[in-house]
Image: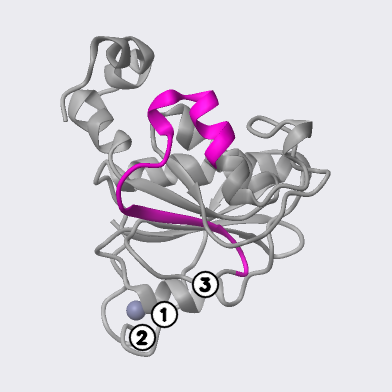
Amino acid sequence: MALREDQILRYSRQILLREVGGRGQESLLAGTARLDGIGASGLTAAAYLAGGGTPVTGAGSLTLGPWAPGFLMGPSDVGLPVTEALAREVPALNPDAGAVGQGGGLVAELPAAWSGEAPWVALGGDGMRAAVVFRGPEGCLWCFGETVRHLGSPPDGALGVAVGTLGALVFQRLRLGLGPALGGRWLVAPGTVEEMEMRRCSRCAGREPPAES
Ligand SMILES: [Zn+2]
């Protein structure tokens, strides 16, 4: 898919980044990211992904609550199923990002069910810190599952917004084929990012570390 002139203008800041470029922008525009979440972190991630050109569609049947209005949702979206609200608001934010084609990744607030194509990006927390856990197509899905199983739901408020932004960035990096293929980060208020030690599945335990870079 070649970029149109209006797309080159819209994404010029990203295209100018060496890690994105015209080819990279085409991969950000291709395939639809599924969003499973209705909190600050999930909706923020959806807004950033859509702004960057990635189509976003809702997964699951949850309904937006009174906290939803923010970057992406307005007051009139409260009470709508997330799928319906995203179908309305995503193309309004960026006409390129209306859902198209088959799934191309999943962003979900924990706890969540994981299936389908990578990248997978989990937004969670441990009560004190926010967490992002991610895997690309090469990352071990059992190690991913073992790690997210020990995390709770992501925080609301500013830390939730921040972890949603980080989650969108991680998702875009994986779409661009940038490593690492498996990993996690803690986000500590007011905005410090720390490396997370991944748990190992029984197949990877005792062998070389899971693909970290
Ligand atoms: Zn593993």
Q: Nearer the viewer, residue 33 or 195?
A: 33
In the image, 123: left or right of 57? right
What residue would you read off at disc 1?
Answer: 200
Mark 2 vs 1: CB contact within 8 A: yes
Q: Quadrant of residue 71?
A: top right
Is ligand 1 less than 8 Å from the beta carbon at label 2? yes
* Residue with the most extreme right position: 66
What residue would you read off at disc 3?
Answer: 113
Q: Is residue 197 visible?
A: yes
Mark 1 vs 3: CB contact within 8 A: no
Image spot of residue 149 (x, y percent):
57, 77
Helix, strand or loop status at disc 1 = loop
Badge 1 or badge 3: first in the primary sequence: 3
Magenta stretch contains residue 160: no
Q: Nearer the viewer, residue 208 or 116?
A: 116
Residue at x-position 47% and y-position 27%: 51
Badge 2 or badge 1: first in the primary sequence: 1
In the image, 72: left or right of 15? right
Image spot of residue 135 (x, y percent):
37, 61
Mark 2 vs 3: CB contact within 8 A: no
What residue would you read off at disc 2?
Answer: 205
Magenta stretch contains residue 102: yes
Image spot of residue 58 (x, y percent):
53, 51
Is ligand 1 less than 8 Å from the beta carbon at label 3? no
If the picture is divided into quarters, which one holds ligand 1?
Answer: bottom left
